[in-house]
Amino acid sequence: MMPALVIDAWQSTESTSAAFTVLPDGCRDLICRLYHDRCPQWYISPLFDRAVTLTSVDTLAMVGYRLKPGAAIDEDSLLATLGSALPDTDSVALALDDASTSAVHVSDRTFIEEAMALLATRPRSVEHAARQLGVSSRTLQRRVVHATARTPGYWLMLARVRHCARNISAEQPFIETALDCGFVDQPHMNREFRRWFNATPTDFLHNSELKQMILMPGFGNS
């Protein structure tokens, strides 16, 4: 069974240096690097705000657990618990549960989960989201920033641009897709694509690798 804080698990078996692209998905990954000649190494990836190209060097394999967007964990405690253990889903689940419990109060965690779930649905505005949650915009801003180090507006735009990228189609003009996804016009959509993905809507239309990546579990499609 997948750990409660995990929305996806993956593994890579690249044994030599290999470059790969990571699109912003609103998630951090708990990753175990397996090496040829040393103990496994656990680490937590950063939250990527734009597309980046990374290189895997000298690993036998990597096993990753994609954490829920906004998941609050005690990173030091989590990594200390896992140590140099081999990846095991049951052990990871227990370690994540302990690290989550020590990181934030249950009531705060519940509110953030509700706020993130609502922002993932692409409400009309942050103000509209705050009203639905029964708090002021300032309170929503303060609590989301405290928990995630990103603003509600950040999460709302990320959900919007990811939804748009998933729905780019040759059957629908870009302007209609832009409006359907909440952008004021096509140039606005194009700017956000370049900002987040370093790519254009046309790139997503014709590049199967980009299309496959944006369909992977992440914020707004977990």
Image (tube, rainbow, N blue to C red):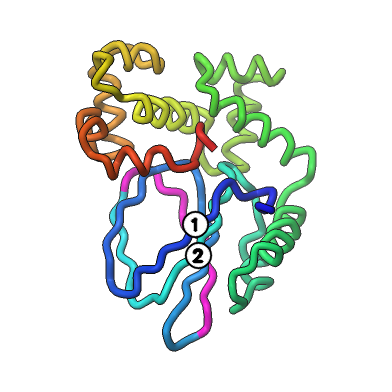
At label 2, the amino acid type is Val
As for residue 124 lying within the magenta part, the answer is no
Q: Residue at x 58, y 46 (%)?
A: 7
Residue that badge 1 annotates:
10
Residue 39 position (above or below residue 154): below
| Left or right side of 139 for 189 | left
Residue 188 position (above or below residue 222): above
- Local SS, label 1: strand
Q: Please, what is the dominant secondary structure of the magenta stretch?
A: loop
Quarter of image, res 181: top left
Q: Earlier in the sequence, mark 1 or mark 2?
A: 1
Which x, y percent locates residue 22?
35, 50
- Residue 63's tag is 2
| Left or right side of 37 for 57 | left
Which x, y percent locates residue 52?
31, 51
As for residue 43 lying within the magenta part, the answer is yes
Give the residues drawn in magenta, as a range. Answer: 39-51
Which x, y percent locates residue 106?
79, 43
Query: Residues under labels 1 and 2: Cα distance?
Result: 6 Å
Residue toward you, 108 or 173? 173
| Left or right side of 140 for 105 | right
Q: Residue at x 24, y 21 (%)?
A: 170
At label 1, the amino acid type is Trp
Q: Residue at x 21, y 34 (%)?
A: 206
